[in-house]
Amino acid sequence: MIQSKFMLFRYRILLLFIAALFTAWILKNRELFEAYTQVIPGTQVKFTMVPIPGGSFLMGSANEKYSDETPAHRVEIEPFWMCTHEVTWDAFELFLDKNYETAISEGPIGQVVDGLSRPSLPYLDMTFGMGKEGKPAIGMTQYGAIQYCHWLYLKTGIFYRLPTEAEWEYAAKAGTKSSYFFGEDAKKLSEYAWIAENSNESTQKVGLKKANPWGLFDIYGNVMEWTSDQYEADFYERSPEKNPQNPSIKLYPRVVRGGSYKHKAEEISSARRFQSEPKWKQLDPQIPKSQWWFPEAPFLGMRLVRPLNPPSPEEIKAYYTKAPIDDY
């Protein structure tokens, strides 16, 4: 009898200990899941990541004008961080040009980073005369965008990637149900975005417009942003409910989001889906065409995300080392 009481007491103590550990883990992770600034090691270049809380939302819309937004469907998203701004030239050029990275770095760039495959230097001005200072990097392919994430992973040890289409829309809506995170009035979009009506037909410095409720700037306009998904007009008819994704297995088309400085206000919304096109490489004289650049897409850029719960090392390697598809 005494022994059984003692065992019961020990069991209760063990349960209390486990509960305390679990509570401490929750508090620690809750504390860590906050905005932070990432400095690219060896440089003065930095960017800010903000937490996007997990939750569910209604993805898509009932807009008959764009049938690929239908049907609207309930989706559940795990928490992640998202960069407050689109990737800018000062960060992307470190990856683009090893000599430039070496020149401005405060120390050796490291053998692993040194051996990473990098883009061929473009044969034309990829800013298209719009300038670089404070502006989003443009014209990279989805493969090039993922390899930038790979380079960043080797530099920081942190798994950065492109958002899924669902993550992008969830972050853009920021808990709202309207066409825009600020409501339904397209005339107000110029307060939040660089679009055809106010951009002077050019990219603009990031962060000059109002942010959305979750601290994301230029989520509409300026440049369209890569996602990791294949574009299929009817994907919403069979989309999974939890963390949906449609991995890219064909070269075209792939999903880009947000609209750009070339789009009119009525062409943009949180739910609007855009797709990559072969004509973005019409000027490329190479055979096969470049796996790194879209020389006719000065309106195309990227934004980083980081999942709160990172994948395994094997999954990370598979994400970064997937071979590109030749483009003829």
Image (spheres, rainbow, N blue to C red):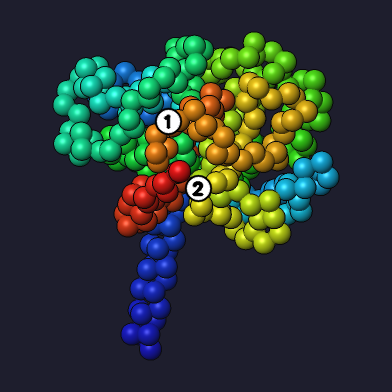
- Callout 2 touching callout 1 (CB < 8 Å): no
Whether residue 107 is visible to the viewer of this picture, yes or no, is yes
Marked residue nearer the N-terminal end (2 or 1): 2
**Nearest the eye: 231 or 40:** 231
Q: Residue furthest bottom?
A: 1
The Cα atoms of the two marked residues, 2 and 1, are separated by: 18 Å
The residue shown at (53%, 27%) is 296
Q: What crowding class fits label 1: few (fewer than 14 Cα within 10 Å), some (14-19), or many (20 or more)?
A: few
Snapshot quadrant of residue 64 = top right
Q: Residue at x 69, y 13 (%)?
A: 198
Total count of labels: 2
Whether 188 is drawn above or below 18: the answer is: above
Expressed as whole percent of the image width and height from the top left, the position of residue 312 reads 35, 56
Along the viewing direction, whichever of 205 and 65 lies nearer the viewer: 65
Instruction: Provide residue 310's location: percent of width, then percent of height.
Output: 40, 50
Would residue 301 be visible to someone looking at this image?
no
Q: Secondary structure at mark 2?
A: loop
* Residues packed near mark 2 inside 10 Å, few (<14), some (14 to 19) or many (20 plus): some
Work out whether residue 209 or residue 213 is closer to the camera in this orientation and state it.
209
Residue shown at the point (56%, 50%) measured from the top left: 230
Residue that appears at 37% across and 68% down = 14
Quick check: 308 left or right of 199?
left
Quarter of the image for the C terminus: give it: top left
Which image quadrant is residue 170 in?
top right
Secondary element under disc 1, as helix, strand or loop, is loop
In front here: 177 or 246?
Answer: 246
Q: Which mark is residue 224?
A: none
> Where is residue 23 shown, x and y percent of the image?
45, 54
Residue corresponding to mark 1? 285
User: Image height check: is 85 above or below 129?
Assistant: below
State the quadrant of the N terminus.
bottom left
Residue to which mark 2 is pinned: 251
